[in-house]
Amino acid sequence: MSYQHLTVSVQDRIATLTVNRPDKLNALNAVVIGELGRAIDELVASEDVGAVILTGAGRAFVAGADIAELSAVSALEGRRLARRGQEIFRRFETSPKPTVAAVNGFALGGGCELAMACHVRVAAEGAKFGQPEVKLGLIPGYGGTQRLPRLVGRGRALQLLLTGEMIDAHEALRIGLVNRVVPGDQLLSAATSMIQQMLMNAPLALGACIDAVDRGLQMALDDALALEATQFAVLITTSDTAEGTRAFLEKRPPRFTGA
Ligand code: COA
């Protein structure tokens, strides 16, 4: 599949999806948003892909929604715009294959929201994060008001949302917005080695972890524990669990097949 503003490459079951609109700091216009949706669907469906790295070309990860598209939008269109972006970002969040944001530079507004929709975030030392929508008279529309407090807590989220300030990668690590910070030239190798570690594990178990965390966080604890037990029960009958337990007892690495 070909894209105007994305590049996709696959190596050793790891897909690297790069937002490639560097002259506009990879700002998310309607085309980019649509292409992100098509790309994640394609990668989730592909048998050659086990996990996805999402990054940006040039000096930005993504510098937000395309501000040029935000003026002269009716309330109805604004709602439609937000719902479309939310729905497409949600596909990254609910992908049964791990999605890792490799944040190479500015992750502002929709860029910070896109990174938060991925399962894990690795940041280059020079990366910058923020939700500056209030400076434009807006609030985040692609999940920022909901995912940021879930990641960093209500007080820190409200500080970022209300000031619109930019924070650096080390501050993002300190507050739990990112998982790891590495020198810029090691960003993709660090993201790749984290994913390689994930891909050594059983694929169905990866998907079940993602689903249990995602759906469980939206439930009362007792319901979420019941969901976990059901996922556990399904996995315990799989060939991969038989292989994983046998391999442990035979003191050899497991050979998982995803069945
Ligand atoms: N939407 C549309 N275009 C954007 C953009 C966005 N969110 N962010 C950057 N661009 C464009 C700029 O307009 C500029 O285009 P031009 O060269 O045609 O004038 C180009 O990208 C480079 O950006 P510039 O502002 O010149 O770079 P900078 O290094 O001076 O500043 C930022 C970098 C990220 C601080 C600044 O671009 C910025 O504040 N961007 C908007 C961030 C934002 O508010 N995002 C939330 C949107 S809801």
Image: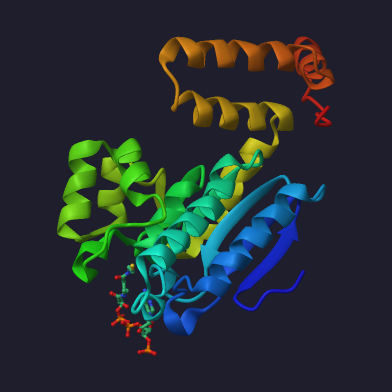
* Residue at x 67% of width, y 61% of height: 38
* Residue at x 45% of width, y 21% of height: 219
Give above or below for 28 relative to 52: below
Left-right relation of 216 to 140: right
Where the N terminus falls, by quadrant?
Answer: bottom right
Give above or below for 55 relative to 13: below
Colouring: rainbow
Left-right relation of 166 to 177: left
For residue 199, say whether it is visible.
yes
Q: Nearer the viewer, residue 30 or 197?
A: 30
Residue 42 coordinates in the image, percent (x, y): 74, 56
Q: Image quadrant of ligand 1? A: bottom left
For residue 190, say whether it is visible.
no
Residue 130 coordinates in the image, percent (x, y): 28, 59
* Residue at x 22% of width, y 37% of height: 154
**Residue farthest to the bottom, as pictured:** 23
Residue 39 coordinates in the image, percent (x, y): 67, 60
Where the C terminus falls, by quadrant?
Answer: top right
Residue 224 coordinates in the image, percent (x, y): 49, 16
Tell me the quarter of the picture where residue 242 sits. top right
